C-alpha cells in the first residue's frame, strides 16, 4: 500500500509499504476512504517536534476489510468512523467519558492513517459504523468527526458553552471553526472569533459566529472585555496551543469563567497566581472524541450539520506534500486526502 511518511521537517513523501494485517484479536483492518492533514501535523513539519521517517495521519473513515476473532460491533463491509485514539471504551476512565485517557489507549498517529489501509486496534471501542454506505458528499463531514469536529465539540463542552453565554474563540483553524459550530449548536447567545483571514471569517460566520475581531494576544483579550461590558466571556475556546493563545484565552474569560483548551500544548506555562486571582476554570487536553461520535454522526447523517466545509482543498494521497505546504502557508484551512487509486 501507499503511505505518507515525514522523513524530516519539511519533507513529506509517499512510500510503498506492506499492507497491514490483524495482529491482535481485537483489531480491524479498514480500507481508508478519506483521510486528511491535521494542524498538529504541522508541528513536526515546521521542526518544532522531532521527526524521523514517521508515518503520518490519525484521522480516517473507511470500509472494514477484516476483523479479528474478538470483534463484535463492526463487521466486514461496514463504513466506519474512528477516533484518533484507539480505546477499549470499557475501562473506568472510558466509562467516565474520557476515552482519550483510556488505560489501554493507542494513538492512531503511531500507526498512520494517511494511507490506503489502516489497522485499528481495539476496534469495538474505537470504531462507529454509519447506518449504511454514505453518499459521497457526506464523507468529508464524517471525516471531520474523526478529530476536528469532536475536538471542537469537546472544547465547547469543556468551556460550558450554552444558552445565555458569550463564547470567545481563540484560533481560526479547523478546530476553532468547528468549536464555533459546536457553541452555536449548544445554544450560545454570542460567539466572538479572533481571525485575520477573510475565508476563515466567512466560514466562522456561516457556522454561527456573531462577531469577528482581528486583534490577538493581550489586544485580543482586551477587545473581548470591551465587547462584554468589561467582564469578559463566559466561555472561551483555545484551539492553538501556544503561550500567547493560552494567555489570550484566560484573559478573555470573566472571573469564574470557563476555558476549554484543546490546542496541542507547546511550551505553555500558566502562572498559578493568575488562576488564583481570576477564578477561571480550565478544562481540556486531548479530546475524548469517542464520547461524542454517536451524537455527531447522527447529526451529520441527518444533515443538520455540515462540518466538512472546513475541507477547502482535496488532493490525491500521492500529492500529500502539496497539502502540507498549503496548510503550512495558510493557503488551506484543512486538506482532505483521497487514498483510493484510479481504477
Image (tube, rainbow, N blue to C red):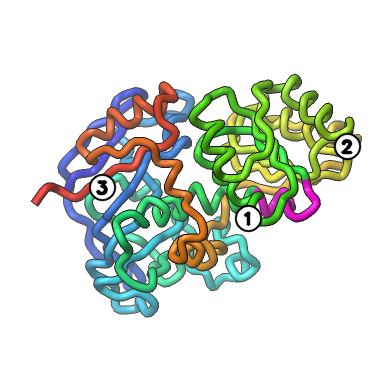
Disc 1: CA contacts within 10 A as few (<14), some (14-19) or many (>=20): some
Considering the whole magenta stretch, tell me its main secondary structure.
loop
Q: Quadrant of residue 265?
A: top right
The reply to whether residue 261 is visible in this rendering is yes
Mark 1 or mark 3, whichever is nearer to me: 1
Q: x and y percent of residue 226 in the render?
A: 83, 27
Question: Residue drawn at (52%, 26%), measured in percent from left and top?
Answer: 198
> Do residues under tags 2 and 1 come within 8 Å of each other at their CB atoms?
no
Question: Residue drawn at (75%, 32%), measured in percent from left and top?
Answer: 270
Residue 185 is labelled as: 1
Q: Label 3, label 2: how many angstroms apart (C-alpha)?
A: 46 Å
Whether residue 57 sits left or right of residue 18 in the image: it is: right
Query: According to the image, label 3 marks what residue?
Result: 115
Residue 278 is labelled as: 2
Q: x and y percent of residue 58 in the render?
A: 39, 48
The reply to whether residue 104 is visible in this rendering is no
- Please state which of residues 199 and 55 is positioned toward the viewer in this rendering: 199
Pointer 3 or 2: first along the chain: 3
Amino acid at each position: 500500500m501507499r503511505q505518507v511518511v515525514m522523513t524530516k521537517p519539511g519533507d513529506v513523501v509517499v512510500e510503498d509499504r506492506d499492507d497491514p494485517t490483524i495482529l491482535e484479536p481485537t483489531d480491524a483492518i479498514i480500507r481508508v476512504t478519506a483521510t486528511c492533514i491535521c494542524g498538529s501535523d504541522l508541528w513536526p513539519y515546521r521542526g518544532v517536534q522531532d521527526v524521523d521517517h514517521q508515518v503520518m495521519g490519525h484521522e480516517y473513515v473507511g470500509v472494514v476489510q477484516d476483523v479479528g476473532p474478538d470483534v463484535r460491533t463492526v463487521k466486514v463491509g461496514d463504513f466506519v468512523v474512528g477516533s484518533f485514539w484507539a480505546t477499549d471504551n470499557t475501562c473506568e476512565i472510558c466509562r467516565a467519558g474520557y476515552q482519550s485517557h483510556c488505560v489501554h489507549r493507542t494513538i492512531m498517529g503511531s500507526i498512520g492513517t494517511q494511507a490506503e489501509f489502516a489497522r485499528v486496534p481495539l476496534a469495538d471501542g474505537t470504531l462507529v459504523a454509519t447506518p449504511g454506505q454514505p453518499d459521497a458528499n457526506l464523507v468529508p463531514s464524517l471525516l471531520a468527526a474523526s478529530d476536528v469536529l469532536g475536538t471542537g465539540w469537546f472544547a465547547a463542552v469543556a468551556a460550558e458553552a450554552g444558552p445565555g453565554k458569550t463564547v470567545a474563540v481563540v484560533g481560526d483553524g479547523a478546530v476553532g471553526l468547528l468549536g464555533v459550530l459546536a457553541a452555536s449548536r449548544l445554544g450560545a447567545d454570542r460567539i466572538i472569533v479572533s481571525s485575520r483571514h477573510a475565508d476563515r471569517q466567512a466560514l466562522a460566520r456561516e457556522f454561527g459566529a456573531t462577531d469577528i475581531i482581528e486583534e490577538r494576544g493581550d489586544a485580543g483579550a482586551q477587545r473581548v472585555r470591551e465587547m462584554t461590558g468589561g467582564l469578559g466571556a463566559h466561555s472561551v475556546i483555545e484551539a492553538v496551543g501556544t503561550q500567547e493563545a493560552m494567555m489570550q484565552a484566560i484573559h478573555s474569560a470573566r472571573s469564574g469563567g470557563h476555558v476549554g483548551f484543546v490546542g496541542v500544548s507547546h511550551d505553555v506555562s500558566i502562572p498559578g497566581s493568575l488562576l488564583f486571582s481570576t477564578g477561571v476554570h480550565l478544562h481540556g487536553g486531548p479530546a475524548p472524541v469517542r464520547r461524542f461520535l454517536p451524537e455527531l454522526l447522527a447529526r451529520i447523517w441527518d444533515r443538520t450539520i455540515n462540518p466538512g466545509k472546513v475541507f477547502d482543498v482535496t488532493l490525491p494521497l500521492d500529492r500529500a506534500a502539496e497539502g502540507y505546504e498549503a496548510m503550512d502557508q495558510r493557503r488551506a484551512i484543512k486538506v482532505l486526502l483521497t487514498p483510493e487509486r484510479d481504477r
